[in-house]
Structures are given as structure tokens and as C-alpha cells.
Amino acid sequence: MVDVFNKLKDVVSTKFISNDINIRHAYSRVVDSIQQGIPEYVIRPKDANEISEILKIANESNVPVIPRGGGCCEFGGSKPLEDSGIVLDMKRMENILNLDTDNLIVTMEAGISWAKLNEYLSNYGLYTGCLGPGSGLTASVGGGISHHSVGGGGGAKYGPCTKHVVSMEVVLPQGEIIETGSQANKFSTKPFNRYGNGPDLASIFMGDNGIMGVKTKVSLKVYPKPPYVAYKTYLLPRKSLELSSMIFNKIRHKGIEVYDSMYFMDLLVSVGVQQGIFPLWEDLKRKRGIMFYTIEANSEVELAESVKELDKIFLENKAQDLGPEISDGNIGKWHYEEQGHWLIAHNLWGLVPGFMPLDAECKTSINNYPKILKDLELWDMENSDEMKKILDITGMRPISGAGPIILIEDNTVELTAGFTSFESYHKDKVYDEIKEINMKLWKSMLKRLTKHGVSWYMCGDILSRLLIDMSAFDESYLNFMKNIKNSLDPNHVLSRGKFNFW
């Protein structure tokens, strides 16, 4: 492998490649510590041409390549499946290349974070449609496109970030470089349209979880930020789970274009207050479910009318307005004005020192999530004996459930389900039993949710293979996906192992 290292070094120079064991270990995991794979090399390319050369070397030597953006994925997607391969760290490619204020399109390198991009756009009174995933302070644009990410801010109004892609530059697994959309026409001087010049090939690389190509440049539609905004937070009465679903549905059926709306379950509110992560709700006499909405408008009249319609929905269902200020408990205001959209999605992570998330984020219909959450309560009880084994070792039981339920596009919500548990290293000792139980429970929950017909937008390592193992896909669909993968990547160099593609 010395030969491979020297060839790679010639592409990027010694400064941007490492085979140091400490560096390699730093890239061996993502959010959870269960799935670990130590790469042989970590490399930071500067552009598509360097990535093309890296992929050509990888094909010649049969070495897998794993693209990594911000490393914020929750299913092991940006680390090796095994102890091998090249991690392609995209964070060096974080430049904004062009802002077309006439056509409202921004073009940037795919390694840039959603936060850096939106900070730049804010200087022009603009933002991206959906500010990116909840981890957008560090998550990259390329990673978000790879996952159909949604969350952050504006998901209810704008939907997932992939809806706003105009064109992309992509390096295919064997090293070819292509452009999509309007840029497929070599005479086009700048991106302006996604659909045209034949089939929408851009979609192959959206939600692909990094198996079809490496996104190097992305052009996104951007939007003027409306000058008027309102936000209210409501305490719901009893049976808030079913009520929240009904309220989401009414918002959609009345055609009110909310920017964001979220529901916090009773248990989440109660536990969050106890653990000090929701200090703004400490004084509430009743720790029940909470919902908020944010609405934007281009005029005061338009805003007032939307607020009137939204308030009517909540008040008819006996919800209690907590007041206009953050100090009153108005988390909606904090979420919008204080950029809480990048802090709120994963509020139970790190709740206890040594706790890690075993995530099960997915999309489902508004009508479906109350049934799913009730079934997850049953799942918790059914797995109580396994949970107790961890309790006996650590003194604390894993916590299962869901974070905020986030209204996203159409009649769909993002279900931030999963559970938090201890890592296997606990109080100066390694417990292999904890790791085994965590993996068993994690797979069990993912299977349970899959059988509810949810839509997985982020699949990574564990989930992409589990979906194949449990035959979740129709055979014709899976064969179609295999044929595309085999055509683009016959050596299965790129993200080897995902979806059991070897």
C-alpha cells in the first residue's frame, strides 16, 4: 500500500494526506461509537480534478473511497465499513463561487457548511430554502444533498434541501466529471434551471448516501427573507399527541404556509425540564406537550391574517399561548431569532456524560406518527430486560422515544426517534456487553420503524444494509438501483458496502 500512498501524495501533496494512526482514528467514527472503521488514509482534495485522480488510483488498486462532509451523519455513513480505504475529507472545498442575484441562485463548493453559506447569504437579505439539517453548524451542503436533509429552519415552508438544487458538478466513481441541469449544455455560462437537456440525472446523486458520485459543486435556489415574522408557542391540553397531529393537519388543509412548526411530546418536555435543557419551561405548572409555529410575510396585513388563522386553530383546541417573549416560554422566537434551529433537533444527545445517540430519524405522514410513537413505547417495554442489563452496569437505563416532531414538506413530518445509551467505555472499563446490547436494540428499533412504512432519508452504513437484509425493497426496485450502481461503479470503490453493494 506504500505505492498507493505515494500516488495519492502526488495528487494533493504531503500537506493534505495522512496515514498517521491518530489522524486515522479521528476519522473512524461519526456520531455513535458502535460503528467504527479505521481508514488507511485521510485525504483533503481541493477540487474535482484532484478527486477524479484519487478515484482513478482507487479503482486501479481496488481501494474503497468514503466521502466525508461534516461527519455529522447518524448511521455511520462517512466512515469506512471496515478498517480500510480512503476517507475523502471535503472540508477543504468550502468556497462560495458565485451569487447570481438576478436569478437568485448561489453556487458553492460542496464541502461548505450550511451555517457558513447562510451567514454569507444573510448579508444580501437571502437564505436557502430550508437552512439545512439540524446539524447545519458543521454539516456540509454535499452531505445534506446526499441525504435529502431537512430540519434546521424553514422545513415546513421549503421542504428538504434537495428541492432547491439547480445543478451540480459530480465526480463519478471511475473519475469522470459531469455537470447536471442547465450546465449539461456546455454553452451555458451559468446555472439557471434543473430540468431540461434530457432526463433529470441530478436526482441520481440526491439521497444517494454517497454511493453514486462525489458532489463537488452545488447550485441552489435562494430566497429573499420576508421582512415580517411572527411566532407563538402553545401549551397543549391532555392527549397532546393526537391533538398535535390534528393541528398539523389543519394547518396544511387550510393552506397556511408556515415557515416552521414543531411538537414536543409530554415526556420530552418533562425530562428536558428535569435535566435543565428547557429552562424556559421550568415555571410551567403542567409539563405537557408544547407546539410552536413561525410564519413569515411580505406585509403586515398578510402576517396578521395568517396569525389570526393559526391562533384560531390552536385556541379552538384549548391550547394556552405562553406569551410573546422567550422568557415567557416562547421557544418559537428563540428558534427563529436566536438561530435555535441548529441547536434544537438533538436536544437529548449528551444529556448524561457518556451518553450517545442511536438514531432512527425518518419521515412519515402526519396521520401516522401518533401510532408510531405509541408503538415505540411498546417496543421499550418489550426490550426492558435488555435495557436493565445496561442499567445494572451503569446505574442508568437507556432512554427511548422522540425529540421534536418537525413539520416538513406537504403532509409529512420528520420523526426524530431513537434512543440514547451509554458507550461501551464506562468508568475506565470497556464493556463489550453494552456494545452488543446497543447494536441489538438499535437494529430492532430500525426494523420496527421500517415496518411502519416510514421513509428513510439518511441510511449510512447500518440502515442501508439492514434494509437489504430484511427485504424492505421491492426486488425490481433493488435491481434497478443495483444496475445503476454497477454501471457507474463496477469495482464498487465508492462507499463500498452500503446497501450491501460490494
Image (cartoon, rainbow, N blue to C red):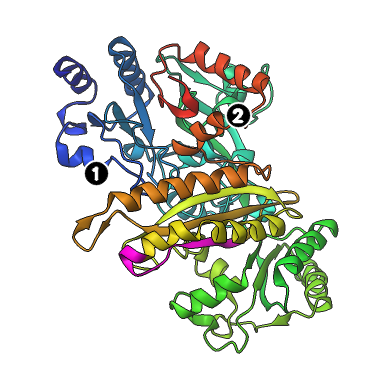
- In the rendered image, the vertical position of residue 102 relative to residue 267, given as above or below: above
Q: Nearer the viewer, residue 82 or 212?
A: 82
Q: Secondary structure at mark 2?
A: loop
Tag 1 secondary structure: helix
Q: Is residue 465 above or below residue 384?
A: above
**Magenta segment range?**
392-404
Q: Quarter of the image holding residue 10?
A: top left
Residue 59, disc: none
Residue positioned 24% across, 44% down in the render: 26
Does 396 appear in magenta?
A: yes
95 on left or right of 21: right
The spot of residue 293 in percent (x, y) is 68, 68
Specify the quadrant that holds the N terminus: top left
Identify residue type, mark 1. Ala
Q: Quadrant of residue 9?
A: top left
Amino acid type at mark 2:
Ser
Residue placed most toward the observer, 433 or 168: 433
Callout in the foreground (1, 2): 2
Taking 224 as reference, is 377 above or below it?
below
Q: Residue 383: horizontal and vertical position, in percent?
A: 51, 56
Q: Residues within 10 Å of mark 2 (few under 14, many from 20)?
A: few
Inspect this view and state whether residue 372 appears: yes
Locate the C terminus by quadrant.
Answer: top left
Q: Earlier in the sequence, mark 1 or mark 2?
A: 1
Circle 1 sits on which residue?
A: 26
Q: Position of residue 149 (x, y in %)?
A: 55, 45
Q: Is residue 71 magenta?
A: no
Question: What residue is rendered at 18% in x and 26% in y?
Answer: 13
Give the image location of residue 499, x and y in percent: 50, 28
Q: Quadrant of residue 48?
A: top left
Q: Which residue is mark 2?
A: 471
Which residue is rendered at x = 55% and y = 52% of the image? 131
